[in-house]
Amino acid sequence: MKYGDRQRFSAFLLSWLAQTQAKSPWLLWLHDDSPSTTLSPAFPVPGDPSGGFGKSRLLHRSLSLVRQRFPGLPIVWVDGLCTAAHDQLSLLEHVVEQLQAAYPPWQAQTFAMTRETLQTTGQLSPSGRHSLIDLDRRERLWAALARDIKALRPHLPAEGPTLLLFFDHLEQLLPSAQELVLAPDERFPERFGLPRVKAVLVSRRPPDWHQSLWKGRQSEIVTVALPPWSATEIRQLLAQEGVLQTSATGTAPAQLTAASERLRELTGGQPALVQLACKQLQRKQLRLEELARLDQRTFSEHLIAWFLMQEGPLPWWLLALAYLLPGSSEPGLALSWLAHLLNRFSTRLPGQEPLSKAQLLTVPGIRLSCDGKSVSLQEEIRHLLVQVGWRLLDPDGRFRRELSRLVLTHSLTALELEAGQVLPEADWQAWQRLQLLHHLIIDHQEGWRRGKLLLTRALAQRLPATASRLLAILQQFEGQLSPLKRRELRVWERQIQQLEITERGREPEQAEPA
């Protein structure tokens, strides 16, 4: 399905929520429209679909309508950019809190007592530690929660949804999303033993029906493709921001329409790129009348000029962030890491005064985690900074190679000493992947050797999620690989898929809880 009119999507969302019959799809998958059917943005990203079409913003706007239509419905929002979203116990506690608030006087007392007992005896880490819960403790927690859910059933409404889950930035939770599931023999996302649960999955990509987690689940999922911004939507934004008055006073409506259509062609209708263009139009660094004469390369240079004109350390922070990020397979880079690395370049970088989060939030396409500790960029903005910004400022790549060498020679232990605390295992793994990326950049052969060692070790330890993230980094360099090494990538990919199936065990039918 495609809903170019975002108002129509809100109406569809409400209609889908009201359909709670046993055979109705209980999962709604909202994704960016296929790049094969949309316009390509400046410098399209190999291997990653064009996207960033405003899914999160659309859903947040729709939430008020959902609450009006279904007052009292417990809603759980899980953001893949947030570290807590990757922690099984944090998710469980969030769900329980929302259920208790929605259905008083019910309390998940058995679950709370079991969790406290396990934590007191050292058998369970506190939430937020990214610790996997082994099978025995999972079964104990699930048995306790199931007992509480049984007591909750008399308090549930007779009809309509009983729980609504939103999983935003789902690609950041995959392929380890199954690790968030508590109940034995249930597939992600979990329904916690409740009837009439609804879940919205938000991702850049549509579901891969060959992937083990989604295989055979077409009847459970309704997919909605969100297209890029239309020329009409772009013109509305230009009018809203006052660009039409300041940049094209007296321009005929036909010319304004043509300018909006040209802007859509140049940006691919991607909101972050449109917003950048809008900022340059407001500054009169770009004029609507000249859009028709600009080729793609020149237009991209106009966009990158906005970054370079920012005051203080912001331009260098963004350029370094874009280069250092391992890519779309990672949720982001810790701000403390970025500051620590750039401080080592204090003699090379201008203005190393602290950078405020408020400054970061002025940048189109910037994404801060919900705890404010890590930062990432939408892929089209990251690609613009790397392919255009660095090409202009560092044409021979010398400065970027120095950044890569700094990553390779730096130890995360120094960050632990600086922070005065032991960093969780997830941070060590993320740093290991970051170093792998820059090994591949500096010395491809050595990087391949290290990547192969890490990946085969993850497979031997039966860690499909870890192996999949490592594989994603190696795949970024597939164009430089020999046919033999490309075949190895395919073999590892199949091994990961098989391991995911094996680790999950038998594939249940996902029957609706009675």
Image: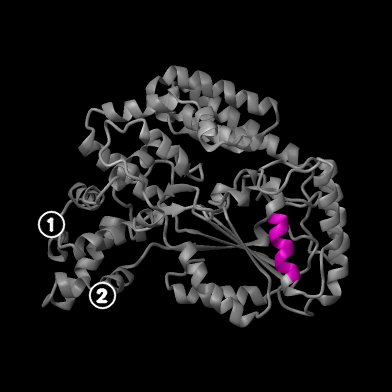
Q: Please state which of the two labelled residues, at mark 2 or mark 1, is closer to the viewer.
A: 2
Q: Majority secondary structure of the magenta segment?
A: helix
* Numbered disc 2: secondary structure: helix
What residue appears at the point 15 percent right and 58 percent down from the top-left corner? 285
Name the residue tied to disc 1: 293
What residue appears at the point 39 percent right and 26 percent down from the top-left corner? 406
What residue appears at the point 54 percent right and 49 percent down from the top-left corner? 171
Of the numbered discs 2 and 1, the one sitting upstream in the chain is: 2
User: Identity of the amino acid at label 1?
Assistant: Arg
Image quarter for residue 152? Answer: bottom right
Quadrant showing the C terminus:
bottom right
Q: Nearer the viewer, residue 514 or 144?
A: 144
Q: Position of residue 343 (x, y in %)?
A: 36, 34
Name the residue tied to disc 2: 239
Is residue 191 rendered magenta in the image? no
* Relative to 467, residue 231 above or below: below
What residue appears at the point 50 percent right and 26 percent down from the top-left corner? 411
Q: Position of residue 286 (x, y in %)?
A: 16, 59
- Magenta-colored span: 91-100
Whole-angstrom CA distance, mark 2 to mark 1, is 22 Å
* Relative to 150, residue 18 above or below: below
* Relative to 71, residue 173 above or below: above
Is residue 270 visible in this depiction of the protein?
A: no
* Numbered disc 1: secondary structure: helix
Quick one: label 2, few (<14), some, or many (20+) residues within 10 Å?
A: few
Is residue 244 visible in this depiction of the protein?
A: yes
Q: Nearer the viewer, residue 376 or 12?
A: 376
Q: Position of residue 489 (x, y in %)?
A: 54, 28
Q: Position of residue 469 (x, y in %)?
A: 56, 36
Q: Nearer the viewer, residue 61 or 298?
A: 61
